[in-house]
Structure formats: structure tokens, C-alpha cells
Amino acid sequence: MSKNICSVCGEEFEDKYFDKEDKKCVLHCDKSNSNKEILFWEYFNSYIKKENNKDLIEIKDIEFPVINNRDKEYIKLWLDNAILEKYVHFIRCRFQDEFNLTNTTFENEIVFSECNFYGDITFDNCNFKNKVAIEKCTFNKKNFNIKNECNFFDKFIFMVNKGTLTLNFELLYFHKNFISIFGNKDIDFNCEFQSCFFYPDSFFEMTANNINKLKFSDIHNYTKDFSFDNNIIKEELSIYNTDFKNIKLINLNLSECKINIESVSFLNSIFIGINWGNLFNDKFSKSNSNREFFREIKYLYDNTGNIIEANNFYALEMKEREKELTKDLKEGKNFFEWLVFKVHGISSNHSQDWLLALFWILSLSFGFGFIDFINKYLDTKLEYILIDTFIYLIFICLSILIVQTKKINNFWLICLFYLIYGFITKDFTLFKISNHINPFSVMDSWDNISFSELMYKITIAYLIYQLIISIRQNTRRK
Ligand SMILES: [Zn+2]
């Protein structure tokens, strides 16, 4: 009779602890279609007892079965016996079911390396006195929860994992050493930190990850070293009620994600190489504290000499101010302040968009040129006033509509205006338009200027000023 030698561990086994088909022992064989669970836990306990005289317990290539209620006692037994005092390394193990540990103190390090998890992993109210590492593991659409007052007194490392996962950290205390979430580029994962405390001797780093949704809420950050380096957030970044003073954000790609910020401070933080994507396309959720956030980011960029980003955040801050003023207006307050803001926003996006200012100069000038042409055919003053006002209003309303909806490119609209104007007035060389726009022409024709012409010239002078300021804002150096 052939001997029962396990093809994984090479040991010889009694018949009942051996799967002849699989040629593996009860620890290493596939248990998905068998009812060897009780035998497994029995044998596993004796195995752990045997290993218990070593300082490092290596649990290699073991297939942990689906856990029935009756098996829970066995699990408690092996935990109580062995795992807590020793270094425990799970290597290439497969967990067919969830892995739960509650009220447990780990005196020594616990490492999961190249393991495969088919159920949730939960550490509930545990203390980790030594290193915890989860590296090169594969997750299968499950949750990894560390929650309910867990204390970390040494490193926590989550690195180079794969699969699909949600990582939840809730009510944790990081006392010292580093927390590193590193190199998880091949994993489809969400990550959430809630009510966590990072004490002064700890440091946090999140490096080279691709994350779908990242959320921080109620974080108490007392460490001097909190850094994000080289991460991509794909769907959503949410930060609520958190003190992120003195943190470092370096090479962060936020180009595709939505951002929700509420009651967050980034005072004295460092922002380098952040790809914000399109800041003006509803990137930020509606929040009461957006203006404060934009102002703070503008200040940070200003201090590091990144004038272009600072200007962008200035424009966002102004937009928020405009919203506040619109709200005030509904309550019957601050009409003139609102009007000035509105005009400033529409004409040049608060001195940020020189193309917009140019668009308005051309658009209004075509309007004015057109009226000038029409006026030749008008007789009475009343006709002048009515028709001129009507045409001018159409030009302004159409332009505002275009600017607000951004459905048509401003340039196409200018081309359209040019063609209409050109065909009707035959002034294809724009002789009249150029003379209207020319701000110096006001000087020599001051004597015979009409009121509408005066208004036009003042408007154009304002827009030319905005054009120059906007170009300067986009290119200036400190
Ligand atoms: Zn074996």
C-alpha cells in the first residue's frame, strides 16, 4: 500500500487526515467540496501546539475552510493557545470564509503574505503591539475592517495587494511608527478612515496607490509626518471634519474624481504636482465651507509661488462669494456688491480668463457696429432708442447665454457675429469695429460723442482693462 505523503508539506499522514485524490493532507487539500472541516480544525490545533515552541509560527499554503458555527470553538482554541505570543506569518494561505478576531492582543507581529481571501477580514477591538503587515494578498470583492478601538503600537503595512476590496479603518489609535499603504496599483479598492487618531510619534504615508474612493472623516492628526505621494484617486475624494495641517500632498492625480470637502483645514500643508483636472466643471460638491477651502488652497499656492493654481483657486473662491451674494440678494441685501461680482464673473471669470474678456470686446463691438449701420435707416429719436436697445439686448443676452451654458465655443460665436455683421454692413475689413474698439479714439472725438457711444466706450475700456489684467494674472511672476 502506498504511503499518504502530502504533495505540499511532504509529511506522512493517517488515512483520515489525508485526501487521496488531491494527494494532500487535511491542512493543504481543497475543502470546498468536502466535509473535512472538523478534522481540519482538530489537526490544525495539534499542528499549532507542535509549532508553539518556535518563536516564529509559519502557517504556509493552508486552505482554511468555510466556518460553521460548530467550528468557532476550535478557532478560539488555536487563538488562545498560540498565536498571540508568537510571530505569526500566514504565507500563501487561502481563506474560504471570513476571518474575524475580536478583543485580541497581539504581542508579536502578524503578517499575511500572498494570501487569498474569499471572505471579509475583521479585527474588532484588538491591540497590535508589534508589526501588522498585509502584503501581496488577493482580495475578492470583500471588506477589510479594522474597527472599534484598535490600538497600533508599531508598523501597519498594507502593500502591493490585488483584487477588489474596501478597506475600512474605524476608531483606531496609531501610537507610533508608520502606517504605510503602499503600491496598491493592481487593486480595485476603496479606502475609508473614520474617527482615527494619529499620535505625534506615528507617521502616515500613502504612496503609489490607485484608489477609487478615498474618505477621511473626523481624523485627529497630531503627527508631523502625514504624506500622500504619487496616488491616483479615480472616483471620489471626501474629507470631512478633519485637521490636515502640515500634511504633504505630492503628485496626486485628482483629474477624474469628484471632491467633497467640509470643515477641513490644510494650514501649512505642502501641495506639489497636484493634477486637479477641470476645476470649473462641478468638481467640488456643494458645501458650506468651500470658500474657506479655496481661500486656504489659494494661499498655499501663493506661498509656494504657484501663481497659476493660486489664481484658479481665487476664481473658485470668487464664484463661492458670488453664490453667497446671490443668497443675500434673495434676502434683499447687498444688491450693488452682487452686481459688481456678477459683471466681474461674466466678463472675465474674475480676471482669470482673458479669452472671455476678448470675446466680450468683440461681441459688444459687433453689436455696436451693427447698430451704427442700422441707425442710418432710422428717422426718429424714438426709433433710435427702441431699436438700438432691442438689438443690443439681443447681442448681450445671446452672449450671456453662451458664456453661461458653454454649449458653443466662444470663437464660433464670434465667427457667426462676424459673418452676419460682414454680410449686412459689407464692412468685412472691420474698419468701423476697429475704430470703435480703439480706446484712444475717445480722446479725439470727445466733442461729438453720443450717450450710447459713451457707455459703449466705458464698457470697452473696462473690458480691455480686464483683458490686460487677465493676461497678466496668467503669466505674472512674483
Ligand atoms: Zn500537507
Image (tube, helix red, strand yellow):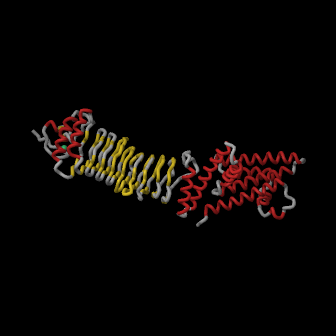
Q: Is residue 189 left or right of residue 293?
A: left
In x, y percent, where is residue 252? 47, 55
Q: Nearer the viewer, residue 186 or 462?
A: 462
The answer to whether residue 374 is visible is yes
**Front-most of residues 68 and 28:** 68
In which quarter of the view is residue 225 placed?
Answer: bottom left
| Above or below: residue 37 compared with residue 228 | above
Position of 351 compared to 201: left or right?
right
Q: Position of residue 2 (x, y in %)?
A: 11, 40
Q: Quadrant of residue 308?
A: bottom right
Foreground residue, 359 or 271?
271
Q: Position of residue 62 (x, y in %)?
A: 23, 44
The C terminus appears in which quarter of the rendering?
A: bottom right
* Outermost residue to the bottom: 478
Q: Position of residue 99 (x, y in %)?
A: 30, 41
Quarter occupied by the N terminus: top left
Please name the residue shown 76% across and 49% down the image.
Answer: 420
Direction from residue 122 to residue 250 in the image, left or right? right
Question: Image quadrant of ligand 1?
Answer: top left
Q: What residue is at 41 percent from the left and 56 percent from the top?
A: 223
Side of 233 relative to 383 (left or right):
left
